[in-house]
Image (cartoon, helix red, strand yellow):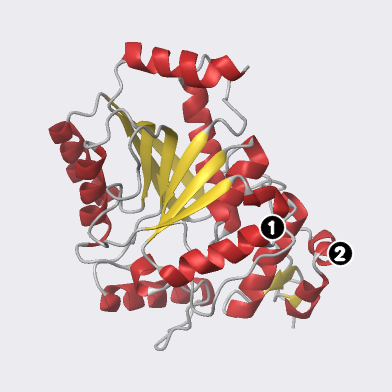
Amino acid sequence: MLQNKREHPKEKVSLHPRNKHRERYDFKLLIDSYPVLSQYVRLNPYGDESIDFFNPQAVKGLNKALLKYYYNIEYWDIPAGYLCPPIPGRADYIHYMADLLGSSNHGKIPAGNHISCLDIGVGANCVYPIIGMKEYGWSFTGADVDRVAIESARKILEGNPMLRNRVELRLQDNSQNIFVGIVQKGEQFDLTLCNPPFHASAAEAKAGTIRKLKNLSGHKISKPALNFGGQNNELWCEGGELRFVQDMIRQSRLFPASCFWFSTLISKESNLKNIYGSLKEVGAVEVKTIPMGQGNKISRIVAWTFLAKTEQQKWIRNKWNKML
């Protein structure tokens, strides 16, 4: 029996203004683009077309349709159990970083393949490079500690000719390192991105999944199925988000002239105080905090640079504007 029809806003105003996913999913267009999605689409209790977000195959099917319709991705797949990221949130990160680059360039967002980005933890899904390349023409280096993830990302590149010469993949062979062993001598990245492991243990990750599914369903969940997937290194690490980001900050200090803006997502607001303290300890010249919101979830980007204003201007003049 259908419940009373809900009125939905025309746009998801919490998403970035340039985000292609601000409107509700148009399942007719998505199914036309990726017909397999039709087997997962059904009417929810309010009479709206939707998918079962508890079904990992349905979530993956939706991602395939979104990536094909909006980003012209012909082949995209991930191994069973690997993270299937929510596309709208990933797009938001890219757009806000584009704005940050633009804010350093008199409001003009630098675009084109001479803008190079480093994705720490590119994952099996390779989503940040897909969106960044399609939206702004940027080039990417994707790093990961997981060989299976790197191989999966490589298959995505091979299946999409437009990505092949725009994304380079590098395996991080030391799980204690983040930038060390990845950033090469003389390299310059205009920005780095990272979606760090959120939890501090496997048990904490499981409890977090149970809470998420309970919020989605409205009833108690005891044995969660990871509808969005995630390997251990994607979901948790010793010390959780805070320790990972603090390690990232300390290593970034070893490469002060190798990147214009370092950045990372921060999910837990309570971690910000310690993160700001770590940035002060390493001598970050400028720190930016950019709020983001997807539905009921609130997160933020923290970005930092070691470049003084004169060094920033030299970087912009020599690397961005000489290509105009």
Measuring from the top left, give residue 147's x and y in whole percent. Answer: 42, 69
Foreground: 117 or 92?
117
Residue type at mark 2 is Asp
| CA distance separating discs 1 and 2 | 13 Å
Q: Is residue 128 above or below residue 47?
A: above
Measuring from the top left, give residue 184's x and y in whole percent. Answer: 35, 41
Residue type at mark 1 is Leu
Give the residue number, with chain letter if any, for mark 1: 67
- 10 Å crowding of disc 1: few (<14), some (14-19), many (20+): many
Q: Outermost residue, front direction?
A: 185
Left/right placement of residue 39 relative to residue 91 reads right
Q: Which of the two labelled residues, at mark 1 and mark 2, occupies the earlier sequence position? A: 2
| Residue at (49, 78) in percent of width and height | 81
Foreground: 190 or 270?
190
Which of discs 1 and 2 lies nearer the camera? The answer is 1
- 10 Å crowding of disc 2: few (<14), some (14-19), many (20+): few
Give the residue number, with chain letter if any, for mark 2: 32
Measuring from the top left, give residue 105's x and y in whole percent. Answer: 50, 17
Measuring from the top left, give residue 307's x and y in whole percent. Answer: 30, 22
Kindly indicate the quadrant of the structure image that contains residue 278.
top left
For numbered disc 1, what is the local secondary structure?
helix
Left/right placement of residue 95 relative to residue 69 reads left
Kindly indicate the quadrant of the structure image that contains residue 44.
bottom right
| Residue at (68, 71) in percent of width and height | 61
Q: Quadrant of the C terminus?
A: top right
